[in-house]
Amino acid sequence: MDAARKRELKKAGKAEIEANEAVIQAMLLESNPAPPGSFADARNYERGQARSRWLERHGPALHAERAQRLCVIAPAPMRHGVTGWHYFRCTGCGSVAPSRPKRNRIYWWACECGNVRLRRIGKWGRYVIRDEALLEAVHIMGRGAPKA
């Protein structure tokens, strides 16, 4: 690899990092719109962190209204068909579901439009997806302040 190629890759990497930081900053601002340093800021931060821990621990599938109320959702970049984030959204109805659901004995879930269905019994489980074009990988973060 020559020096020009290294510089080119370094620039591309820095641009990607800046784009990811911009998305995360926008999500943080939306999840906690209170002025920094205020009591509301601290309360919203604690509530948002608790919701993020709950989402991580339980990995629930959420219909659109509840997802918008509890979470901040932003598109995640896909690289070679893989995302590092653990949720995807049905763009047909706005429901979000974990890419790897927690193991429950019996778990049935379907998005509001019926495009995505999850079935799990013991160790057996599978997703049934009618139209993959309606799915997108998303970042998901607990919302600290109620959505205005």
Image: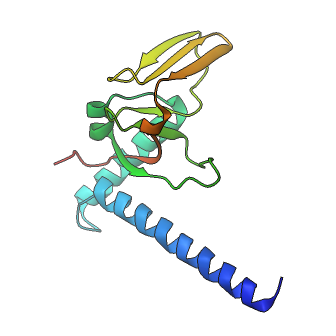
Residue 45's spot in the image, x, y percent? Answer: 35, 54
Q: Residue at x 23, y 67 (%)?
A: 35
Instruction: Pick out the residue farthest to the left.
Output: 148
Q: Nearer the viewer, residue 139 or 4?
A: 4
State left or right for residue 73 relative to residue 103.
left
Give the residue at the far bottom of this rendering: 3
When asked about the image quadrant of residue 61, the answer is: top left
Would residue 68 be found to the left or right of residue 22 on screen?
Answer: left
Q: Is residue 12 above or below residue 62?
A: below
Q: In the image, residue 95 lies at what x, y percent?
A: 36, 32
Identify the residue shown where x is 61% and y is 55%.
79
Picture quarter with the N terminus:
bottom right
Residue 15 occupies which quadrant of the picture? bottom right
Between residue 10 and residue 21, name the one nearer to us.
10
Find residue 27 and report its horizontal and vertical position in percent. 37, 57
Q: Please name the residue shown 33% across and 23% down the image.
A: 113
Please, is residue 80 above or below residue 58 in the view? below
Q: Residue furthest right?
A: 1
> What sort of colour scheme is used for the picture?
rainbow
Asked if 131 appears above or below 138 in the picture, the reply is above
Q: Nearer the viewer, residue 124 or 81?
A: 81
How many numbered badges does the structure rendering display? 0
Q: Residue at x 23, y 61 (%)?
A: 34
Residue 144 at x, y = what percent?
A: 31, 48
